[in-house]
Image (tube, rainbow, N blue to C red):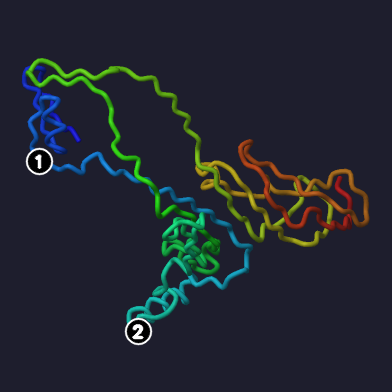
Amino acid sequence: MYNYKELDPAECEFVSIGPADELKKHGITPRVDLPGVGRNLVEHPFLFAGWRSRPGTFVSELRIDRAALSVLRWALFGTGFFSTNGAAGNVFIRTAPGLDRPDMQYTCMSTSVSTHDVWYPWIGAQPVHQLGAGVSMIKQDSRGVVRRKVRLSNDGKSLSLAPDQVEVSITIEEVQVTRDFDRIEVRARDFKGAYSVLPQVIHLRLAGPKSTMDKLQLPSDRVYLDLKGLSVGEHSVPLTLSLPADVTVLEQKPQRLKVRIIKPGE
């Protein structure tokens, strides 16, 4: 690890922490001799996968009355929902018979919840529970020493790196999220007649960029029934959706609605 402060080219000084012998080879006076710096680097890759549960799968422990009771149980007795570990279980395996110990770990989470999502019934939306599992490597081989060739000058004149320029290609993609919209009331749009519809509410699961999904609302001009031209009687009518171009529908229940035209539109 090399650290320097740049006042001007004549005053550039080096403060070095690392293996002293290695630093001295490059004409750098060690500040602290730490032979382990830059060596025995081990990566620890971890992959997490989460699945949103269907609405109603779990009892919502984040409803305000249940959450308050859980906090009280935790404070008084150290028990209850808020005293449990986030990892419900761990499984250790060997990927090859000759290994002296496991090298892979599976971490199973029962559900994923956040105290930021405390639910106030009739005020906010019920939080979505999530099932999760993680996979990680726990016995990797070290990559040894990682080196990068540089040209350093500590004679008070200059500091140059080789190469002094690199070409970097960066692709920035916004995080994609899913969001459930429950009990959306369905109405006809620009229809002057009389009608009835069953069911009166639907469920939608949508996906899109996080910035779009966080702000997305579904008023009656975005989710509606087009009943123009229908005669008196019963009809099976698809739902009409007017959504942003970067939002996709993952699930819709039901797909069609039963509409009874009592009086046709003018």
Q: Position of residue 82 (x, y in %)?
A: 41, 73
Q: Residue 74: x, y in percent?
A: 36, 78
Q: As drawn, is 176 to the left or to the right of 159? A: right
x%, y% of residue 147?
A: 28, 31
Along the line of sight, the residue nearer the viewer: 44 or 218: 44
Placement of the C terminus among the 4 image quadrants: top right
Query: Is residue 255 found left or right of 44 in the rendered image?
Result: right
Q: Earlier in the sequence, mark 2 or mark 1?
A: 1
Q: Residue flagged by tag 1: what amino acid is it?
A: Val
For mark 1, what is the residue? 32
**Which residue has dot 2 on it?**
77
Front residue of this view, candidates 226 and 99:
99
User: In this rendering, is residue 55 above or below 48?
Assistant: below
Crowd tier of the residue under label 2, counting other residues whose Cα lies within 10 Å: few below 14, some 14–19, many 20 or above: few
**Up-down relation of residue 109 to residue 96 (above or below):** below
Which image quarter holds the N terminus? top left
- The residue that appears at 46% across and 72% down in the rendered structure is 64
Q: Amino acid at mark 2?
A: Phe
Q: Residue at x 93, y 56 (%)?
A: 233
Residue 12 appears at what percent x and percent y? 10, 23
Image-quadrant location for residue 244 = top right
